[in-house]
Image: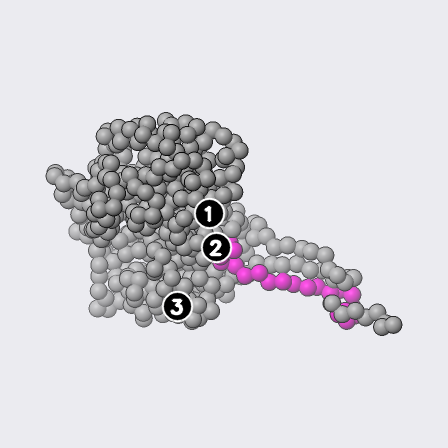
Amino acid sequence: MTEEFGLFIDGVWSTPPDARRFTTINPATGEAVGSFVSGTAADVDRAVAAAVREFPTWRDTPAPRRGDLLLEVARRMKERKPELGRTVTQEMGKVIAEGLGDVQESIDFIEYMAGEGRRLFGETVPSELRSKFCLTVRQPKGVVACITPWNFPTAIPNWKIAAALITGNTVVFKPASNTARCAAEVVRLYEAAGLPHGVLNLVTGSGGVVGNALVANPRVRTVSFTGGVETGRDVYVRGAQGLKMVHLELGGKNPVLLMEDADLPLALDGVLFGAFGTSGQRCTATSRLIVHEKVYDAFLDLLTARLERFPVGDPLNPATGMGPVASADQERKILDYIEVGKREARLRYGGHKLTGGAYDRGFFLEPTIFETTHGTRISKEEIFGPVLSVIKVGGYEEAVRVANDVDYGLSSSIYTRDVNRAFRAIHDLEAGITYVNAPTIGAEVQLPFGGVKNTGNGGREAGSAAIEEFSEIKTVFVDFSAKLQKAQIDEAPIA
């Protein structure tokens, strides 16, 4: 029997009367993973009201104590890591090593944010006046809406939730519907760790209902959204109507620049992982391979030979290299792009839905490679699947020009043995992240994550920068001169 989950509002799991339900599906087998409530605008109002009520108490809880609670969440997550990693794989479809990695990233970030409870740095600066002290302090924003995608179903929620909580905010969490079980398990961990009622609330349901209600609610002061560009733009516009702070992490069309002096075996491992890890369903996935003409043919031969023995199948099998894509809708979108690619480029490898046996129960696609020219749709539009566009260039300058000529700017990579060229790429590539001799995926929690152009609106998650999204800066002046002093007013006599 499929396990049923309610909403989590004000510390209580409950199912509203006459609530409609939806079911999440294992993309490898078609089996049900869990049953969830389709939340309504009224449910959002109840969740926001609980968060508003609890905000003053949580705000006034000393930040190191908030950090202690986060450490307890991380401890419990470590204990349950094998089970949680399996849940990620069963509900989202990434191979088990990546499912476990998703959970480990959550643990790492929660622990990192717990430490911010003893920092939350402000600054002190000298005053222009005597006997006056000047400083800044951080304060929470209030109620935060965290709206998350399905591709990192524990890591991205925890990126947002842990950073929001350590800075003293209360949260209403709306996850992607097709990974609602992972979201519920995350919330259960915070509940078990002793988080006070109302600090973290979960409302499952559609973006058009739950998401829009959260963005429109006047008591929600900050919206943190990760997802697609069009939805993100809509969230941004709606949030602006309420003068909310809206943080967006959106798409990518990430390039690997493969220079003529690259270590080809190293690059081969990186491109395989970058393009086909998580079935290409990462915003940082390698979707473009920009190759110097001197090594183009040799590298493509190596790449296609490796794919001949690259296992696609059961994501719970540790030997599997790539599992299914996440849903029927995702499969349909990727197959539509593959058809576009077949019309405008040369199909070098793959290009089909896998069928027969266990494949028929899930959403399995072949790893796909197109040889194309810069400017085609598949070379410029985000596909979010296991589809790699390979582009031949004559040198470094052309490679950079091609890399930058897209609407996105999240991650980038260059493979070269030339240290001068590597540092030029760090300067020249229009991206929030640049890797040298490594693929475009593999962010670490202690460093900022985000991009430029249509990848977002300038903020950063992870690292110490994560607290910027969820805190206000208050400037404080302490005058201990015991007299009125007037800044910027020249009190000297006029000649």
Give how far across and how far down residue 130 sits, in percent: 78, 62
Residue at the spot of label 1 = 430
Q: Indicate the amino acid at tag 3.
A: Arg
282 or 372: nearer the viewer:
372
Quadrant that contains the C terminus: bottom right
The mark that comes first in sequence, 2 or 3, is: 3
Q: Would you call the spot at circle 3 few (<14 residues within 10 Å), some (14-19), or many (20 or more)? A: some
Disc 2 and disc 1 in contact, CB within 8 angstroms: no
- Residue at point 73% right, 65% down? 479
Q: Would you call the spot at circle 1 few (<14 residues within 10 Å), some (14-19), or many (20 or more)? A: many
From this view, report whether residue 159 is shown above or below residue 312: below
Residue at the spot of label 3 = 238
The verdict on residue 481 being magenta is yes
Say what secondary structure mark 2 lies in.
Answer: loop
Gap in Å between the C-alphas at discs 2 and 1? 15 Å
Q: Indicate the amino acid at tag 2.
A: Gly
Left of 350 or right of it: where is 200? right
Give how far across and how far down residue 383 sits, in percent: 29, 48
Residue furthest toward the bottom? 494
Magenta residues span 467-487
Gap in Å between the C-alphas at discs 3 and 1? 28 Å
From this view, report whether residue 267 is shown above or below residue 111: above
- Residue at point 46% right, 47% down? 430
- Residue at point 21% right, 41% down? 351
